[in-house]
Image (tube, rainbow, N blue to C red):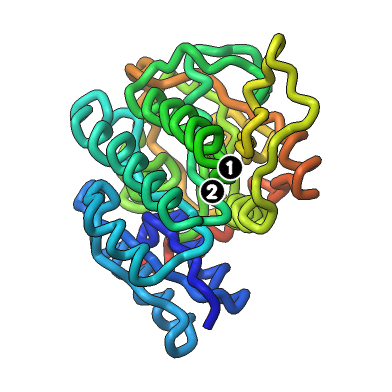
Amino acid sequence: MSAPVLVTGAAGFIGAAVCRRLLEQGESVLGLDNLNAYYDPALKQARLARLEATAAPGQWTFRHQAVEDGASLLALFEQRQPDRVVHLAAQAGVRHSIENPQAYLQSNLLGFGTVLEACRHHGVRHLVYASSSSVYGGNTNLPFSEAQAVNHPVSLYAATKKANELMAHSYSHLYGLPATGLRFFTVYGPWGRPDMAPMLFARAIQAGEPIRVFNHGHMRRDFTFIDDIVEGVIRCLEKPATANPAFQAVSPDPATSWAPHRIFNIGNSQPVALLHFIDVLERALGRTAIKDFQPMQPGDVAATAADTALLEAWVGFRPSTPLEQGVERFARWYRDYHA
């Protein structure tokens, strides 16, 4: 079988979905995850079991391993020689970064540094890595464009994601490593993370418990269905980043470079009010939510919206799953999984 694609964070929400798509395409996949207890590891194990059932003999390998363990990661690269890497492992969660910053320094900074080192020493031909819409921070100029500066993060999580973009660019410049950073916007769908709003809301609605609605409901989010995120990741993986021949150092474009490094938003480009999302979820679950209106949380932002023109120009794709369709699929999975 051909050289494997390494997917870090393979037991995570996006990671497992990307692995499944790669396996369905006939790729050999090497998954890596530390299976931490930030949320229930049983859900991560269930995602892994699903991947095992999808794969043909010899097509899928999983390693229980942390990316910040540099010696072990380099040994894994030496043994398996992956030719492409999708780096999705990270300590997730904006609010958790306020309570436990050390976990983000370890996983998101040290961990990403070890991945970059392994990629450069083993001739990886393309690194695709997860950034986040959180990097736009205090910016209120919507929709967010990759050409905008991202110098005002409002959480440590966001700061580590911007740092990842800068680290990747330096490796692209110094070592010629093609790298593409993807800024994900509020991903939801089947097999989602229990700490994110769709899962929190669904659990509370089903249990007849109040849901906390922050900023008194005055929030807008660019909810992006998981299948659209996966499609964007796969298309970008198949088109390695290249230098921009039109790059102007006197007026630098943050989205491109003289080095083989690119940045793209992946969002649905149709931000919706949080209260509308709750209304759609109520209808999908057939129950009414009890709303507990709360003030804005530290590290949060009032609205997000993605400009995806660069992504569409680069790979001919823009997310487009309607909210009602995506929420219905999520609700159906939620009921089945928790039956």
Contact, CB < 8 Å: mark 1 with mark 2?
yes
Q: Residue furthest bottom?
A: 57
For image coordinates 28% across by 38% down, the residue present is 110
Q: Secondary structure at mark 2?
A: strand
What is the x, y in percent for residue 121?
A: 41, 52
Residue shown at 57% from the left, 55% from the top: 125
- Residue 299 occupies which quadrant of the picture? top left
Q: Residue 180 shows which numbered tag? A: 1
Q: Nearer the viewer, residue 31 or 115?
A: 115
Is residue 262 placed above or below 337 in the rendered structure? above
Question: Between 243 and 286, which is closer to the camera in this rendering?
Answer: 243
Residue 329, label in figure: none
- As rendered, which of 304 and 56 lies closer to the eye? 56
Front residue of 189/12: it is 12
Q: Which mark is residue 128?
A: 2
Residue 39, horizontal then vertical, whole percent: 25, 50
The reply, left or right, for residue 206 in relation to residue 172 is left
Figure check: 258 above or below 86: above
Q: Which residue type does callout 1 highlight? A: Thr
